[in-house]
Amino acid sequence: MPPTIWRFAAALSLLALAHDAGAARRPRYGGTLRVEMSAAISVLDPAATGEATARLAPLVFDRLVRIDRHGRPRPALAVSWSHDAEYRRWQFRLRPGVRFHDGSLLAAGAPVAAVLESALPPGFKVKPGGDILAIDCPRPTPGLAMDLGRRGYIFARDGSGAAIGTGPFRLARLDPGQRAVFTANPDHWAGRPFLDSVEIAMGRTAREQWIDLEVGKADVVELAPAEARRASERGRPVWSSAPIVLLAVAFEEGRPADKRLREALALSIDRIAIHNVLLQRRGEISSALLPQWLSGHEFLFRSEPDLDRARRLARGIPPAARALTLAYPAGEPLARAIAERIA
C-alpha cells in the first residue's frame, strides 16, 4: 500500500518498527525490509480470502483503481473511466504498456475481463474491447470506481495455474506457512519500489515477534493494542491503521432473541472501558454500525451503559430466555479479551 507496505485490514492493527538510535541519517535507496506477522498462507492467490492474503496481495497485484489517503479513487491500471447518466454502464481505459511479471502485456481481453467479473457481485458483466473494459451493472452503481479500489485485483495465470500480477514486487520464494520473499519489479508502471526486497516471516507469535524486534532480527512486527504503550516507552516508532473494521456483538442468524434482551445487553456493555483499557484508545467508539463521520446519524443511538435499565428489562424476560452464549474467532487474543470483558 503505496508509502507503506500494506494497509492492515483491521481496525486496531499496530506495527512496531526497529529504530536506529544513531538517528538522523538519510534513508538509503534499496535494502531488504524484514517483516513478521502472525497470519500465514500456503499460496498467494488474489482469488483467495484470508487475513494474510489481504495483507500481502498488494505487493504483487494491482487493481484498476487505487484509493488515496483521502478516500478518493485514483488511476492505477485504469488511467481513466466514464459512465452513463444512470451509472449502469462504466468504461475503464487500461494503462498502456503494463506488463505482467512473466513479461506478457496487459490487455483488455477475455481473461482479464473474466478475472474482474468474478470479483464483482452477481449480475455485473465485464466486456472487453480494445483497451477498454466495459462493465454493465444490473442497477445504478455510482460508487463502482470506489468499489474497484477495494476489490478486484487484476491477474493472469501461468501454465501451472499460479497467479501472476503486475504489482511493485514479484514473489520470488514462498515456503508455505513460514516465509515469503518479494523482490522489486523494476518495470512497474508507477516506478521501481524503494526497497530491493521484502522478507515476510509468517506464523510468528506476538512474543516471538517482539523478541526478534528487540534482538534486531526483524524491522517491522505486529503489536496488540495493549503492547503499544510499552513499545513507545522503549522508543519504538508505532504506526496504527485507521479504524476500518467493525467489532460488534451479532446475534446468530435464525435464532432471534427477545428485543428486551438485545437492549439489555447493549445497555450493559461498557464501550468506554473497552476502548480505554483493552484497545489503549486505538480505535473509535460507535453505537451504530457506522461512525458519525461516515453515517451522519450515529448520534441517534445511545452508547453509554445503563445497568439499572438493563436489570429492569432483564427481570421481565423468562429466566430460560436470558441465557446467552458468546463466541469469538479462534486465535484472536484481542477478540477473546473483549468477549471476556463483555461476558
Image: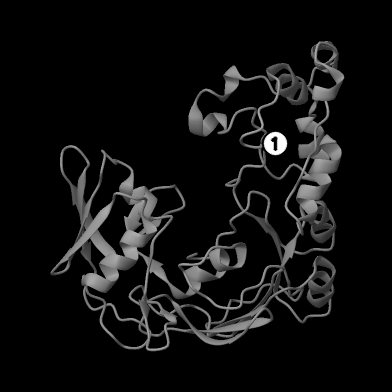
Quadrant of residue 324 in the image? top right
- Residue 164 lies, in percent from the top left, at 40, 80
Using the rendered image of the protein, determine whether residue 77 is visible from the camera's viewpoint. Answer: no
Query: What residue sits 26% from the left and 66% below the top?
Result: 113
Q: How is the image coloured?
A: one colour
Q: Nearer the viewer, residue 342 or 251?
A: 251
Residue 162 image point, x, y percent? 44, 82
Q: Is residue 227 positioned above or below 94 on the image?
A: above
**Residue at mark 1:** 249
Q: Which percent across, then down, holds residue 281?
A: 74, 41
Task: Determine whether 237 is above or below 216 in the image.
Answer: above
Residue 81 higher or lower than 298, as above or below:
below
Looking at the rendered image, the quarter that the C terminus falls into is top right
Left or right: 57 as drawn, with respect to 78:
right
Q: Nearer the viewer, residue 92 or 48?
A: 48
Q: Is residue 160 left or right of residue 330?
A: left
Res. 160 image quadrant = bottom left
In the rendered image of this protein, does residue 126 appear above or below residue 62? above
Q: Residue at x 33, y 75 (%)?
A: 189
Q: Mark yes or no: residue 100 visible.
A: yes
Question: Could you say which is closer to the camera, residue 307 or residue 277?
Answer: 307
Name the residue rendered at 57%, 25% in the picture.
298
Q: What amino acid does circle 1 point to? A: Val
